[in-house]
Image (cartoon, grey):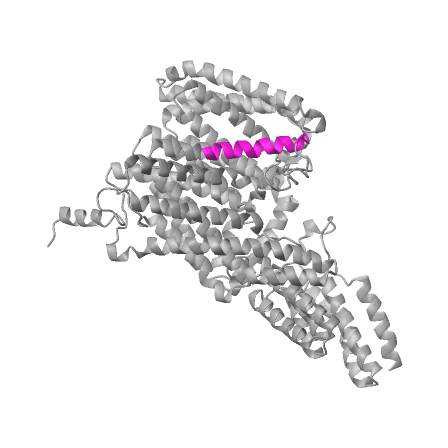
Amino acid sequence: MAKKSDKKSIYQSANKFGESGTSIFPDKTLVAYKAFVLFAFCVLVLMSPYYRGLYFDYELSVFQAVMAGIFILFAIYLYLSKEGFLINSKLELILLLFMVAYIVPYFFAANRRLALGEFFKYAFYFAVFYVASRISKGKAEKLAILNTLFLSTVGVAFFGYQAAVKLIPETARPLGMAMNGLWVGNMINSTLQYHNTAGTVLAFGFIISLMLAMYSRNKLLKSSYFAFSSFIFTAFFFTYSRGSYITLLLALLVFFLLLPREKRISLIFNIAIVGAFVIAFLNKVGANLNEHGKVKLWLVLLIQMLLVFVLTYAFGFVERRLYGISNNIYLVVAGVVGILAIIGFAVALRMHLIPSDMVEKIKSIAMFWKERNFVERMVFYKDGLKIFLKSPLFGYGGGAWVSLYFMYQSYLYFTTQSHNYFLQVLLDTGIVGFSILLVFLWLLFSASIKAWDKKEQKENVIIAGLVAAAVQLYSHSVLDFDFSLASVQVLLFAALGVLASTSSQILQKHNQEKVIYTSRKANFVPVLLTIFYLFVIIISLNFRLGNYYANIGQQALQAGNLSAAYSFLSKAVTYDSLNSNALSDYAVALYRIGDQNKDVNLIAKADGYFRQAIVNDRFNAKIRFKYAVYLLSHGAIDSGLSQIEEGIKLQPLQPANYELKADAYAKVGDYYLGKGDKEKAKKYYEVVLKIPQEIERVKKERERIPPVLKGKENINVFIMTARTQEILNIVKSKFKDL
């Protein structure tokens, strides 16, 4: 039997992929190569929030392709260096398994294109996590990534301020895209274009800035971080994100509890300084968040930052003296500071230092269960669980909510997001994927706590900050759809990569890191991943081109320019053959051109594209209605009407659908009446006459508007449209004559 030491050496030899013990490249060359990869990675992370949060495929596909390239470059570095390229940690393997959970439902997905797109998103996040965790083993690399996260959120605040004072016109394109939606309804949306997501990202950045300040030994640098934390914190308040206000308190509590004792004392006093000046200046900042504050706003912010810098710098000279105080005095001081903070906040309210609309937002939190947003979200969650129960094991693939919610909604509402990340995962990947996610989070945070328990003071500051930052993003994702913006998960997984790396290093130091070693024969996983990411580059760029041509083609189709629509949409479906909207639009262009030119081949070809669109997106009512128009206009009456009935099943609470049904059946009745076939005409007219009863039945069976929402603005009550009633009256008149 082999000795333990022999086994250990065998495992260690297997821990390198393609390693011969020494690198074939000079150390300086590899160092420069690694620095380039790190720089490229940091630039990608830094820029990710500035392109509409990478919510839209048009920007997301480019970032996915670039990240895939960075992953391959880093894999080459690992292969050439002494480190070796291997996927062998539990977290890496579980995250890979989570990726697989997103591709498993592809063949029975609600929308194949969205399912594949979500799979590529998680491939993107895996690459971010892997590179961040493997490249951040050195202090310099670790700080480079953490400072990138910090600067990225400073940029989010900066663009929000700039938009508020109209220094960034909505038509401006400083980053290659229109900067619209950054300041809407007197709220900072910034480049994320949604105030709640901006709120949680700024809260994340605020925690990162506090962590870097706590970590820094240089007094000037420490105070600079605190000064910029006030810059971020002020912008955070002006997002008016009530959910983020709550989750930040939770995250700060986690940060405080995980910090070493001495750092807790430092945090209490420094955050009191930052918070006091932010609150004191809120009204002044708010008064200048308009086109007249182009200069004054920045003066106010600079004065605030300067005061925070000076006071935190001054506090740095007495800070160490507080470390020696007894626990009893420490608790008393903490309590006094807490009481003073509450009193200070109350004074700020009484002196109207906080903008009145912000005060109202904060007060409304106390009665959150009566708030419209909360009630609506409860409805979304209930409807989401109905979807989950239809495919509980593997889910419906990425995009399950947007594809299916019309079928199961309690009343007519329009939202493309479930507003809860964990519910979204449950719908997309079922119990299998959801369980894998929970295992990933358990392994991540349990390893972090084990490492934290080793009392490595400097590293514990990083662990505390990154765990708190992750708590902020994950807890807020329960309330909103932040993680549907890929940039938020890019920031998250970059942070989690550094957290995993830091925890792993501490546990290795104490011989408690358990790595899943694999033999050389099993080292095909890294090779397959490298090949896979080459395909990610190609497919992502194809999707981008497909998206581009689909948008132009759709515009041409709406404008009636059929030749241009045909040209662009044919390219769209070539580059992205899963895009159901492009496929159905291309089918429309084909049959319209075929009708004009009497080309039966084009007309027949359109049918194939409609069918493929339905296969790829089987719960899309709009595509079925388009297909119905095509079938009815080309003599396939029963098939066309069948598609309308299917569309109504998919969107039963949409009044316009019954208008379409009434119009279609009435026209078919008119057609047979014109041919003299009164019996057939009567048959179709009778369907129209029964529509009011159908609407009442559906309303009774399905519509469940919460009492608190009844009568509210933009609550869509399910009633028959005026046009449907008009068609009904005409048909009644014709039916009497029959």
The residue depicted at 18 percent of the width and 50 percent of the height is: 10
Give the percent coordinates (x, y) of residue 583.
61, 64
Boundaries of the magenta span: 148-167
**Image check: 242 left or right of 644?**
left
Examine the rendering and report whether any part of residue 139 can be seen.
yes
From this view, report whether residue 398 is shown above or below residue 34: below
Residue 11 counted in the magenta span: no
Examine the rendering and report whether any part of residue 435 can be seen.
no
Q: In the rendered view of the protein, which quadrant contains the C terminus?
A: bottom right
The residue depicted at 50 percent of the width and 67 percent of the height is: 108
**Image check: 130 left or right of 511?**
right
Magenta span: predominant SS is helix
Give the percent coordinates (x, y) of residue 542.
53, 56
**Image check: 351 left or right of 530?**
right
From this view, report whether residue 49 is shown above or below residue 147: below
From this view, report whether residue 661 is shown above or below residue 153: below
- In this view, the residue farthest toward the left is 1
> 399 and 278: which one is in front?
399
From this view, report whether residue 440 is shown above or below residue 212: below
Give the percent coordinates (x, y) of residue 703.
68, 60
> 719 and 659: which one is in front?
659
Residue 156 counted in the magenta span: yes
Give the percent coordinates (x, y) of residue 352.
67, 23
Q: In the rendered view of the protein, which quadrant contains the N terminus?
A: bottom left
**Image check: 497 left or right of 81?**
right
Answer with the quarter of the image where residue 292 lies: top right
> 555 and 671: which one is in front?
555
The number of discs equals 0
